[in-house]
Amino acid sequence: MIDLNGKGYRDVFNAVLKTQLGLYLAKSDIRQRYRRSTLGPFWITISTAVMVACIGLIFGRLFKSPMQEFLPFITSGLIIWGFISSTINEATTVFVNSEAIIKQLPLPLFLHVIRMVARNCYIFFHNILIYPFVCIFVEKSLGLPALLVVPGFILLVVNLLWLSLLIGIICTRYRDMPQIILSLLQIAFYVTPIIWMPSSLKGRAGALILEPNPFYHLIEIIRAPLLNSFPTLLNWTVAGVIAGAGWLITLVFYNKYKQRISYWL
């Protein structure tokens, strides 16, 4: 059971009330990273565009896929996966990298998670600017399903928040875990349809690989609308169930170990 009066729950609640501060700090991180740069954060967009173009052309020819279908597919997939993987990767050190602030300022610990996820959201917003240009290049239009990108993105962020908090706690206690998580992310990249299309799987193989894969469903609730199709009920259900169950487990875990995080640093 979740103790609504527990220190972990109150920390999350207080951090949410200070979301504006987390967003401000996230913007400051982006500005600091590209300080004195002429193009600033748009270097993120440029580097992602170059990567998408190279991978799209190479794998498009390798899989002999029509560019009008494959290029929007791989562009949206790589951008969404980049958001997910970079958020999870940074979550492994979210408390360790904020050690000085945690020990000096009485801020809610979850605020550091909000700051990190918000920073990656800003990077995602820069990268997604590539997609309309890809659609223009391949003469593909966006339809009514594209409106579902907004609720899909919100649900993805809700999932990344609890996952980042849980990973942050575990990796603060066990400093070898970041390397294990990085290896698992690399495996997830290849078993998730990002650079290959689900249609390439025949028969039962598709169901066995895709349906149990949570990353596939989390990506699909955003990618499907961008490709002018609707996410399936299974996609929404899995993403919603993961969000609910994930937050319940994480809050119980956080209530128990929140006080120990500062000692583990």
Image (cartoon, rainbow, N blue to C red):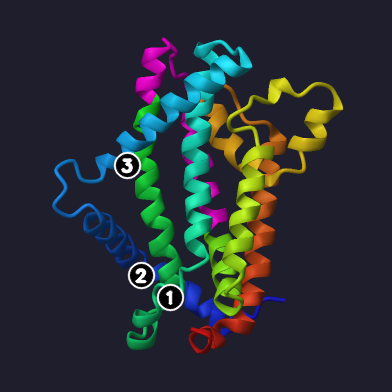
Disc number for residue 44: 3
| Front in this rendered view, residue 40 or 166 | 40
Which residue corresponds to the image point at 34% horizontal and 80% vertical from the top-left?
101
Amino acid type of the residue that numbered disc 3 sits on in the rendered structure: Ile
Q: In this view, does 262 lie to the left or right of 218?
A: left
Disc number for residue 14: 1
Q: Say if 72 sits above or below 43 in the image.
A: above
Over which residues does the magenta segment extend? 132-160
Quarter-of-image position of residue 128? top left
Q: Say if 140 sits above or below 30 in the image.
A: above
Q: Name the residue under label 2.
A: 18
Question: Local crowd at mark 1 within 10 Å, few (<14), some, or many (≥20)?
Answer: some
Quarter-of-image position of residue 32? bottom left
Callout 3: SS: helix
Callout 1: SS: helix
- Can I make out residue 228 in this image? no
Question: How many numbered discs, if any?
Answer: 3
Determine the main secondary structure of the stretch shown in magenta.
helix
| Front in this rendered view, residue 64 or 128 | 64
